[in-house]
């Protein structure tokens, strides 16, 4: 119980939230430029980056369990995940 509250307290701190938003913005912006998506606006880039970070984190955890890449590594993982998300969004958009 104590561990859960410590983890949740650290995860939802204002500083942690700001860092997540910055990583999401950077990852979404870079991924949209790499994929030639033209950008989704500030909010759209943050959303794509955050969901991409989640996807990249899941894939990285499957390939390299318990890995810790630091801030730069986290941004790279988020960019890769955001690129995967953009590719999925394009494939679903074309299927309609």
Image (cartoon, grey):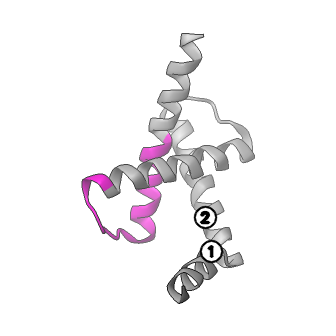
In the rendered image, residue 40, in percent from the top left (x then y), is placed at 68, 36
Quadrant location, the N terminus = bottom right
Q: Are marks 2 and 1 in contact (CB under 8 Å)?
A: yes
As helix, strand or loop, the secondary structure at mark 1 comes to helix
Q: Is residue 87 magenta?
A: no
Relative to 19, residue 76 above or below: above
Q: Quadrant of residue 39?
A: top right
Categorize mark 2 by other alpha carbons within 10 Å: few (<14), some (14-19), many (20+). some
In the rendered image, residue 59, in percent from the top left (x then y), is placed at 35, 49
Relative to 66, residue 82 above or below: above
Q: Nearer the viewer, residue 1 or 76?
A: 1
In the rendered image, residue 4, in percent from the top left (x then y), is placed at 54, 80
Please name the residue shown 30% across and 67% down the image: 67
Q: How many numbered marks, from 0 up?
A: 2
Which residues, given as a range, are shown in magenta?
Answer: 62-82
Q: Nearer the viewer, residue 48 or 29?
A: 48
- The residue to which callout 2 is attached is 20
Please name the residue shown 51% across and 41% down the image: 31
Categorize mark 1 by other alpha carbons within 10 Å: few (<14), some (14-19), many (20+). few
As helix, strand or loop, the secondary structure at mark 2 comes to helix
Cα separation, mark 2 vs mark 1, equals 6 Å
Dominant SS in magenta: helix
Q: Which mark is residue 39?
A: none
Please name the residue shown 71% across and 76% down the image: 14
- The residue to which callout 1 is attached is 16
């Amino acid at each position: 119980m104590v561990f859960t509250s410590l983890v949740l307290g650290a995860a939802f701190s204002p500083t942690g939230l700001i860092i997540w938003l910055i990583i999401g913005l950077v990852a979404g912006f870079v991924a949209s430029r790499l994929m030639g998506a033209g950008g989704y606006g500030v909010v759209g880039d943050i959303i794509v980056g955050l969901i991409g970070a989640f996807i990249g984190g899941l894939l990285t955890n499957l390939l390299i369990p318990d890995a810790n890449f630091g801030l730069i590594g986290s941004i790279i993982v988020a960019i890769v995940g955001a690129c995967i998300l953009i590719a999925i969004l394009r494939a679903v958009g074309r299927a309609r």
